[in-house]
Amino acid sequence: MAEERVFTVAELTENIASKLEYAPDLKAVWVKGEVAECTRSSMGHWYFNLKDDTATLKVVMFASQARNLKLTLTSGIEILVKGSISVYRAKGNYQMLATDIEAYGMGAYRQALLALMEKLDQEGLFKQKRVLPEYPLVIGVVTSPSGAAIADIRRIIGRRWPLTRLKLYPALVQGEEAPPSIVKALKKAYQDHLDLLILARGGGSSDDLWAFNDENVARTLYASPFPTITGVGHEIDRTLVDLVADYSAPTPSGAAEVAVPDFEEVYDNLEYLGNSLNSLVQQELLNREKKLNLLVKSLEKHEPWQELLRLEQRLSSLKKLLDTKAFYVLEQKKRRVQSLKELLTEESPETEILKQKARLKELALRLGKSKEKRFTELKDKTYNLAYGLELLNPDNLLKIGYAVVFQKGKNIKSVDDIALESAIQVKLADGSLKAKVMQIEKDPKN
């Protein structure tokens, strides 16, 4: 028989953890239950049990997620928790890392959002759908100046329609300060002469996108003097501003695609129109020439030479007029195409490449500094967690004079659980005592 593999405790624990933490059906799941043994650390982390009639699940919500919590956690309330399963390797326990918590049933905030949607719909805020400009030359963008959204918008519009000038109106797009920041940026944009306005933000959780469900933000967007496009979140996300905007794109990139035409398509269309116009002029001249020949033959039968002369002169004038108009229209189209070519030449890709190289260099420096800062923060956070765990060690409580009372192996928590003359065991920091209950005094406060 082949030699069987022997795992270390750490190896087996890691094997179990890898299966639980990477299982697709254990990620971003919702669990319903009652809160029990709920505590909050000095650093803002929540620790509690989620239980029902037959099972208990340990739950942790870190401070970075807890700051967006919309309700107060207390033992005994029923909640819905969204999160993923994780393994605490040092203890060999599994737990749930919570990312979102709502009251049981539909969350209060979601109920409020549905009520607000119905209210704004009745007021007609979702019915304003203006036609987007066909060839916008100045587009305003309200978004974070450092997010991926503005980079995607610049890249796509620069490729499709480089004649457009983008004007950025910076705003916070996440957190409690985001709604007033977005409103302020929108109002500032309304003071400029724009052809179109884009309100955008990259993807995120429902809490990350909550600023775009704010009533004041929605009403301010509705008051825009020019057409608006939203590109908020991913394709599956839907916010209040998407319903108010004149056009809602699924992503910031999608908003940029919709906002401008493709330069190559426009150029090809102009060339096609020029050729079509020339064909129409030639066909009209041919038709008039055929008509004239018929008239000449008809006149020749009656010899009305004076009338024939007049018609010939009239035909000559019409032909010159048609030639002049056709030449004028073609010249206008040629000058327009030439102007577009000159503008495109001025927007040299080499200049944009140099700018982007400089920006990439700057971003690389910033990334290095950010990584170093993040490493320091994580190191301090790890130290604080270790120190906090040490303070909560039951052995340390025994060392400072506390004791634990047992009777027949069961932990005694109340004087109601023990009788006079019964034997007990008292555990201290450096050993244990066996004693006998001589007197019982109950605290009148309890």
Image (cartoon, grey):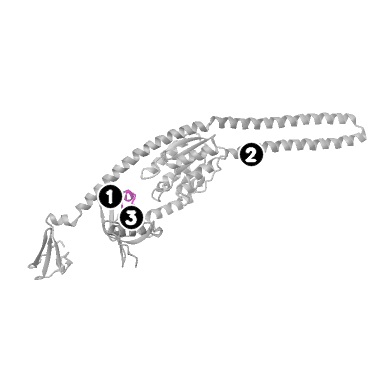
Read off the residue under disc 2. Answer: 269
**Amino acid found under the numbered disc labelled 1:** Gly
Indicate the quadrant containing the C terminus: top left, top right, bottom left or bottom right. Answer: bottom left
**Magenta stretch?**
61-70
Along the line of sight, the residue nearer the viewer: 218 or 29: 29
Q: Is residue 442 magenta?
A: no
Q: Of the residues tagged 3 and 1, which is closer to the observer?
A: 3
- Rendering coords of residue 402 (x, y %): 13, 57
**Mark 3 or 1, nearer chain start:** 1
Res 300 quadrant in image: top right
Instruction: Determine the CA span between mark 3 and mark 2.
Output: 56 Å
**Mark 3 or 2, nearer chain start:** 3
Indicate the quadrant containing the N terminus: top left, top right, bottom left or bottom right. Answer: bottom left
Q: Residue furthest left?
A: 438
**Amino acid found under the numbered disc labelled 3:** Leu
Along the line of sight, the residue nearer the viewer: 296 or 389: 389
Read off the residue under disc 3. Answer: 97
Instruction: Determine the CA span between mark 3 and mark 1.
Output: 14 Å
Depicted 272 relative to depicted 435: above or below: above
Depicted 11 relative to depicted 310: above or below: below
Q: Residue furthest front?
A: 1
Circle 3: is it few (<14), some (14-19), or many (20+) Cα within 10 Å? many
Of the numbered discs in the image, which one, if any, rests on residue 44?
A: 1
Along the line of sight, the residue nearer the viewer: 160 or 355: 355
Question: Is 112 placed left or right of 134 in the picture?
Answer: left
Residue drawn at (60%, 40%) of the image: 265
Circle 2: is it few (<14), some (14-19), or many (20+) Cα within 10 Å? few
- Rendering coords of residue 320 (x, y %): 76, 29
**Amino acid found under the numbered disc labelled 2:** Asn
Question: Is 175 placed left or right of 430 in the picture?
Answer: right
Q: Is residue 69 magenta?
A: yes
Instruction: Determine the CA span between mark 2 and mark 1.
Output: 61 Å
